[in-house]
Amino acid sequence: MQAKLSTRCAALRRGALLGTAVLALVTAGLPAAAGDGASRPDLGRFYDQKVSWTKCKGDGMPKDLQCGKVTVPLDYARPGGPTLDLAVARYRATGHRIGSVVLNFGGPGGPGVAQLAVGGKDFMGLTDNYDVVSFDPRGVGRSSPVSCGDGSDSALAAIEGSTSLDEPAKVLRQLRTAAAACTEHSGPVLRHIGTVDAARDLDVMRQALGDRKLNYLGFSYGTRLGAVYAAEFPGKVGRIALDGVDTLTEPMTEQALAGAHGQQVALDDFVDWCVKDIACPFGQDARSAREDVVKLVRSLDRDPLPTGFGQPFTGQDLVGAFGQALYSKDLWPSLERALAELVEDGDATGIAGFSTGGYALPLRQRAAVGALVDPEDVPLDNLPAALMAINCADDPDRPDAARLTRELDRLRAAYDHASPVFGQYRLTEVLMCYGRPKGTDYIREKVRDLDTPKMLLVGTRGDPATPYRWTVETAERLGSSAVVLDNRGEGHTGYASSKCVHGKVDTFLLYGTLPPSGSSCGPEENTP
């Protein structure tokens, strides 16, 4: 679960947060329970490939990071048809190599190659025995990135203003227009972008890396991907660790409501921290500072700030930036400085970097489907557009027109009550699924009672994005394969913030040694 939704620089303005958003009837051609894609003749050409590694190109890329690609079918039901290239990257093992460990940093919609380049130092301990690998999933980053163009603007406009929900038929028409814009700007990959397809890609990648079993570390949404992989390919499960465990059962309406509340709590914590610093742009009184944050969001929505991107920076762009920055306390000093530039100088450059996921150039044309795109051609709204698309594709319980017509006012009130800052943002995430094909019920129905080797599930008690109860509920669904580590700390996921969690996850991945299920890491062992 990650963050945002919308389009453009202000394109990222219309979104969803912290992850829990289009389409595809992805149940066609699911693997058999034993899940060995290599044994299927029509997939043989994909399972026969090997990754050709070269030095990663681009400014700021670490010298020791290698890049490559893995080719997968666009539609697994028609493997003889069009294909997609997925961007992959690795740090090579420095010690006795026993294989690869694949990382997914969450989202959905987070580009793994860029995140591995930036945050690879946190995983260097794993290179004692593993190549540490990450990738841009289909529809994400350089891997045929999806976009909604101005579609998210249409969706947000549908619920903006105090009277906008008085005409539900008009709202639904605008949402259909938004869905059509996403389809137009994304191309055929949009129909094949759910987690079920991503898990099949992961198995092709496992084989291309030369591994008999998948060793995997997934964060937030990455835990959903890991659980789906284990259900599809139980015979290929190696050592799998899932940190910040996502729900496999709650519909998007409930996920987004819980996310809005959790994000508001995290924002309040940030404000409490900020006001202790004389440089805090909201002053030194926490109560008035919280009120000033709400006023700033509303002011920017009424009167967006011009930017060098050619598109204005709105209050919802700011909300998207908050959502990204609040994942880790390590980002709080940078967030404070960016907010000071925004409030005191009217400069949105720093804060826009959070809301766009780091991309700084407008989309010049619709990204081609198939071959990898250049980094500068990744749409500004790719992260939120992919988040929305994947979450929508994974959710079979989205409200239909009749239910939305009945419940629009109630939903708006519930989301506003959950968070005066994030409520509208998260409601837009839910509404953006309207007008798209029904999501798959595979995750809800099939990802349960797994017959696999033990998997480590880490839940953090103070996690604002993936509540600890989701770890407990998911462990119960997965059955005896799940081993739970209770991280009694704060923040989203535990690996980067807790030495205890970091050590136990690494020990499991490197040596296969698991902690007792139900054991815990204390808050005193968490370091900011």
Image: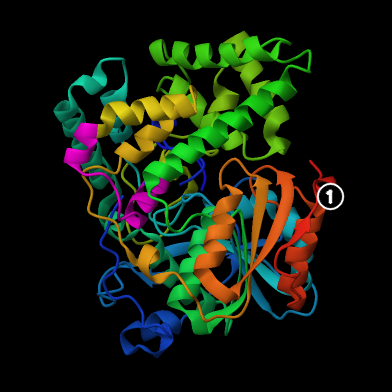
Residue at the right extreme of this rendering: 524
In the picture shown, does residue 8 fall above or below 42? above
Q: Amino acid at mark 1?
A: Glu
In magenta stretch: residue 387:
yes
Looking at the picture, how far across and down is residue 47, in whole percent? 44, 82
In the picture, measured across the screen, residue 526 lies left or right of residue 18, that is right
In the picture shown, does residue 165 fall above or below 65? above
In the picture shown, does residue 452 fall above or below 410? below
Q: Nearer the viewer, residue 28 or 486?
A: 486
Looking at the picture, how far across and down is residue 81, in whole percent? 25, 72
Q: Residue at x 49, y 34 (%)?
A: 260
Looking at the picture, how far across and down is residue 70, in whole percent? 47, 70
Residue 134: image quadrant is bottom right
Q: Main secondary structure of the magenta part?
A: helix
In the picture, measured across the screen, residue 483 lies left or right of residue 22, that is right
Q: Where, quadrant-wise, is the C terminus in this rendering?
A: top right
In the picture shown, does residue 265 fall above or below 50? above
Q: Nearer the viewer, residue 347 or 249?
A: 249
In magenta stretch: residue 47:
no
Q: Secondary structure at mark 1?
A: helix
Q: Residues within 10 Å of mark 1 (few under 14, many from 20)?
A: some
Would you name the residue on which mark 1 appears? 525
Which colouring convention does the figure follow?
A: rainbow
Residue 519: image quadrant is bottom right
Region of the chain picked out in magenta, as a range: 385-406
Q: Nearer the viewer, residue 58 or 250?
A: 250
In the picture, measured across the screen, residue 506 lies left or right of residue 481, that is right
Residue 202 visible within the image? no
